[in-house]
Image (cartoon, grey):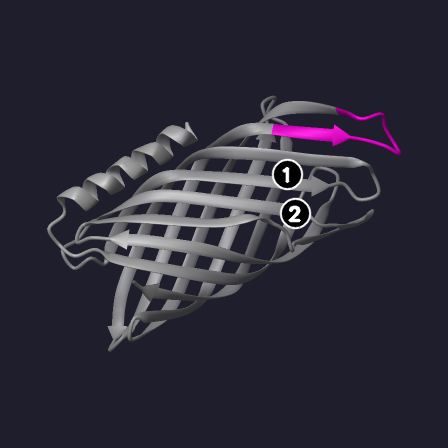
């Protein structure tokens, strides 16, 4: 129900805008990350490298925050398989409502939705695998001052059940064009830890982010698993 989840978040956002008495803090930012990891399949494991850029938007009140984050379906990943290099494309979008857990605003609990879209050509063959998965996202966030205009941020997110459809399309010159589909489910974790400095209206951050994504077919057979981590830099402005 990703559309319902997203609609609910925007309804909550509108209610907060209409009812809050405190001034909202709007933050717009970008995060650039260089990732390396491993792509696991039943037939082989392959190293993965890539670069991605996330666009982020936060709207925070005293006790509630709306967080939006996404990367368009643009690919700079490289999977070095035994049959040759593969260049997949990946798109991610998440939206969550986050609620303050303590009076000091150190800890926040978030709930929302996650959407993942990917497209992978198979090396040496006229075959393209593409899927779109969506499901719920749960988060525990930390925001800790460590000095004048300095802070540490942490984010632990888990997506226990993502579901969707995998499409495999075959075409010339090796095949007559046709497409098959199979139901697919997945789970994912997303961890990050960053150190930040505030300068005027701007925040600058450097940190590390790690992902663990595992997918399987409806029959229970493993589809693939991707594990990766990397360093990131980010900047955001308080509007």
Where is residue 235 shown, x and y percent of the image? 41, 67
> Of the residues under marks 1 and 2, which one precedes in the sequence?
2
**Is residue 174 in the magenta section?**
yes
Where is residue 167 shown, x and y percent of the image? 66, 29
According to the picture, the residue beneath numbered tag 1 turns out to be 224
Give the residue displayed 30% in from the left and 38% down from the top.
10
Give the residue displayed 65% in from the left and 55% down from the top.
76
Left or right of 96 in this view: 91: right
Q: Which mark is residue 39?
A: 2
Where is residue 232 shown, x and y percent of the image? 49, 65
- The answer for how far apart the CA atoms under marks 1 and 2 are is 7 Å
Q: Helix or strand or loop: what does disc 1 sit on?
A: strand
User: How many numbered marks are there?
Assistant: 2
Residue most extreme to the left: 21
Left or right of 126 in this view: 239: left
Quadrant of the rendered structure where residue 5 is?
top left
Left or right of 128 in this view: 203: left
Give the residue displayed 65% in from the left and 40% down from the top.
119
Q: Which mark is residue 10?
A: none
Q: Helix or strand or loop: what does disc 2 sit on?
A: strand
* Residue contact between numbered discs 1 and 2, judged by CB atoms under 8 Å: yes
Where is residue 239 shown, x and y percent of the image? 29, 62
Quadrant of the rendered structure where residue 132 is?
top right
**In the picture shown, does residue 63 fall above or below 178?**
below
**Is residue 236 in the magenta section?**
no
Dot 2 crowding, Cα within 10 Å, few <14, some 14–19, many 20+: many
Left or right of 5 in this view: 169: right
- Highlighted range, magenta: 166-178
Dot 1 crowding, Cα within 10 Å, few <14, some 14–19, many 20+: some
Which quarter of the figure is the N terminus placed in? Answer: top left
**In the picture shown, does residue 143 fall above or below 101?**
below
Give the residue displayed 20% in from the left and 39% down from the top.
15
């Amino acid at each position: 129900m990703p559309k319902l989840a997203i609609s609910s978040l925007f309804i909550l956002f509108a209610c907060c805008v209409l009812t809050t008495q405190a001034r909202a803090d709007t933050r717009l930012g970008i995060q650039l990350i260089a990732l390396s990891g491993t792509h696991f399949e039943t037939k082989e494991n392959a190293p993965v490298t890539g670069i991605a850029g996330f666009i982020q938007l936060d709207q925070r009140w005293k006790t509630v925050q709306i967080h939006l984050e996404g990367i368009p379906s643009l690919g700079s990943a490289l999977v070095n398989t035994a049959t040759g290099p593969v260049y997949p494309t990946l798109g991610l979008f998440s939206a969550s409502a986050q609620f303050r857990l303590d009076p000091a605003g150190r800890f926040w609990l978030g709930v929302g939705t996650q959407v993942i879209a990917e497209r992978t050509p198979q090396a040496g063959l006229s075959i393209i695998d593409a899927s779109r998965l969506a499901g719920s996202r749960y988060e525990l966030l930390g925001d800790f001052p460590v000095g004048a205009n300095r802070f540490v941020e942490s984010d632990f997110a888990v997506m226990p059940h993502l579901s969707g459809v995998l499409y495999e399309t075959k075409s010339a010159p090796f095949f007559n064009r046709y497409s098959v589909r199979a139901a697919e489910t997945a789970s994912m974790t997303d961890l990050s830890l960053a150190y930040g400095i505030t300068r005027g209206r701007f925040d600058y951050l450097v940190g590390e982010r790690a992902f663990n994504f595992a997918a399987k077919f409806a029959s229970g057979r493993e589809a693939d698993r991707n594990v990766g981590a990397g360093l990131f830099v980010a900047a955001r402005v308080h509007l």
